[in-house]
């Protein structure tokens, strides 16, 4: 083993570059934003970790379900107008040939 590059465990553990610190800060802010979007309160994470994420999971699926229902309603509403126009245009185009 080459002793010239050997550093004690503590020095290897706590050796971090300024770029490493900036990267850690950026990742922390990004994770914080995601948790805020999921309505996760930092205080409840400490007191009830699994319950907090279970509630966030349920709320996320509820929000996605509501969004899908909303999108489907507007899809049907638009299709009521668009599909007949599409069929008429296809018939007119087919009659021209």
Image (cartoon, rainbow, N blue to C red):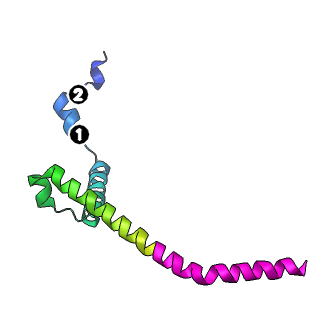
Q: Residue furthest top?
A: 1
Asked if one can make out residue 50 in the rendered structure from this viewpoint, the answer is yes
Q: Residue furthest right?
A: 97
Q: Quadrant of residue 40?
A: bottom left
Badge 2: how crowded within 10 Å, few (<14), some, or many (20+)? Answer: few
Residue 31, image x, y percentages: 28, 57
Instruction: Give the magenta range.
Output: 72-97
Number of numbered discs overlaid on the protein picture: 2
Q: Quadrant of the N terminus?
A: top left
Height in image: 61 above or below 18? Answer: below
| Residue at horizontal 70 percent and vertical 79 percent from the top | 86
Height in image: 14 above or below 52? Answer: above
The residue where tag 2 is placed is 7
65 left or right of 73?
left
Q: CA distance from mark 2 to mark 1?
A: 10 Å
What secondary structure characterizes most of the magenta part? helix
| Residue at horizontal 84 percent and vertical 77 percent from the top | 94
Q: Quadrant of residue 80?
A: bottom right
Height in image: 54 above or below 37? Answer: above
* Of the pair 63 and 30, the residue shown nearer to us: 63
* Of the pair 5 and 46, the residue shown nearer to us: 46
The residue where tag 1 is placed is 15
Residue 48, image x, y percentages: 11, 53
Label 2 with label 1: CB-CB less than 8 Å:
yes
Q: Which mark is residue 37?
A: none
Asked if one can make out residue 29 in the rendered structure from this viewpoint, the answer is no
- At mark 2, the secondary structure is loop
Residue 67, image x, y percentages: 39, 70
């Amino acid at each position: 083993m080459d002793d010239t590059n050997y550093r004690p465990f503590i020095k290897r553990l706590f050796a971090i570059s300024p770029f490493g610190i900036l990267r850690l800060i950026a990742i922390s802010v990004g994770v914080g934003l995601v948790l805020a979007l999921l309505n996760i309160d930092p205080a409840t994470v400490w007191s009830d970790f699994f319950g907090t994420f279970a509630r966030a999971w349920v709320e996320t699926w509820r929000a996605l379900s509501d969004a899908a229902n909303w999108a489907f309603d507007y899809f049907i509403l638009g299709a009521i107008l668009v599909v007949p126009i599409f069929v008429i245009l296809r018939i007119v185009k087919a009659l021209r040939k």
